[in-house]
Image (cartoon, rainbow, N blue to C red):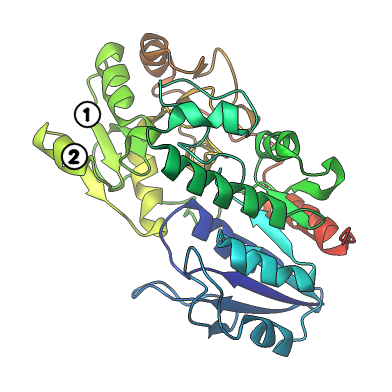
Amino acid sequence: MHVLHLVDRWTARGGAPRYLAAVLDGLSDRGLSLRQDLLAGGADLGAPAPPVPLHRLAGLEAPRGVVPGLVDAVAAFRAEVVHVHNVVNPELLEALRAFAPVVTVQDHRFFCPSRGKWTREGAPCRVALSPAACAPCFEDPAYFAEVREVTERRLHALRGLRVGVLSAWMKAELETAGLAAGRVFVTPPWAHGLDLEAKAAGPPCILFAGRLVDAKGVADAVAAWRCSGLREPLVFAGTGPLRTALEQGGFEVTGWLPHAAMSGLYRRARALVMPSRWQEPFGIVGLEALSLGVPVAAWDSGGVREWHPGVGRGLVPWGDVDGLGRALADVAGRSATAALGFSSESAMDALFDIYRAPALG
């Protein structure tokens, strides 16, 4: 089997690129006479070389617009399967329909035109994409109309295709938005590329890992940590617009770290705190922490409950800052184990099921 992977950009930063790297490695390890190529619009300086041949096509990284030469470039590979990752350009997706691709959807931009199923009023969104439901999240009607049109066009481009998602929560959201139930498959990530023998890279801490933005609950992490009464410092691994304020507040901020370096940071942590305000598509940092024995205090957000050990072991209702603080104090320092069912073998089995499934056309 020859699989052509197509991605907007080859980079090492973020959960979506890490998932793609894990898939490339996982397929390479299968030993099934599988040939792989990777076609990307760009590549970050310093990003590690992918484990398969990397080819470039200018324009794949663009959020909108026709990509010149796309159809001819993809056709030239003569691949049996075209697997599209992290692409949200609706014109590109429409052009690729001729190849009946597999499309991995890793975030909300196919079924939510706003904040990631998190409303303007600051509450989880429990309703399906529609003009009436989504308009209150926008101040500018013209901008709303533009963003809604792009979101609906992305969603429509998926119809009849084989769609992979990271969680049952994502599957339910896409099906509620109108995709056929039999065409959306769950291919969950797993803890990939960590050093299970790593030593702690510093003194004990409470850890927050992720983009430093409101949607990830940075302020809620600070409030829960203070409420917990724990003496270990709260350390932030990541970067984003809230970084400067955190540093000015006296917090240690590591910035973005190569994924291999996260192993030592997880080993420092007595607990990971994860108050995601947006509805988390999966939450890979939580699964990674558990795989290294680190307990996770988290809000019940999106797909988090699918890998989290559950209520009584650090999972609390969305938005409960005081409860999160109590859970953080309760689980810190306890031994934790990763949930079953999140392995390279099970994920690759699920992915091959997608590759073999026929598109509806």
Quadrant where the image shows the N terminus: bottom right
Sequence-first disc among 2 and 1: 1
Up the image or down, 109 lies above or below 132; here it is below
Quadrant where the image shows the C terminus: bottom right
Is residue 110 rendered to the left or right of residue 10?
right
Residue 184: % across, % down: 78, 47
Residue visible at 89% across and 58% down in the picture = 360
Q: Secondary structure at mark 2?
A: strand
Q: Tell me whether circle 2 and circle 1 mark residues in contact (CB < 8 Å).
A: yes
Residue at label 1?
233
Residue at label 2?
252
Up the image or down, 239 lies above or below 228; here it is below
Depth check, mark 2 against mark 1: the one in front is: 2
Up the image or down, 226 lies above or below 159; here it is above
Residue 336 circle label:
none
Q: Nearer the viewer, residue 342 or 182?
A: 182
Up the image or down, 123 lies above or below 212; here it is above
Q: How far is mark 2 from mark 1, CA to CA? A: 8 Å
Residue 92: % across, % down: 61, 69
Q: Secondary structure at mark 1?
A: loop
Quarter of the image where one finds residue 161: bottom right
Q: How many other residues sit within 10 Å of disc 1, few (<14), some (14-19) or many (≥20)?
A: some
Residue 255: % across, % down: 25, 51
The answer to whether one can see residue 25 in this image is: no
Residue visible at 53% across and 83% down in the picture = 57
Instruction: Name the amino acid type tagged 2.
Output: Glu
Residue visible at 68% across and 54% down in the picture = 344
The answer to whether one can see residue 53 in this image is: yes
Q: How many other residues sit within 10 Å of disc 2, few (<14), some (14-19) or many (≥20)?
A: some
Residue 156: % across, % down: 71, 52
Residue visible at 50% across and 31% down in the picture = 135
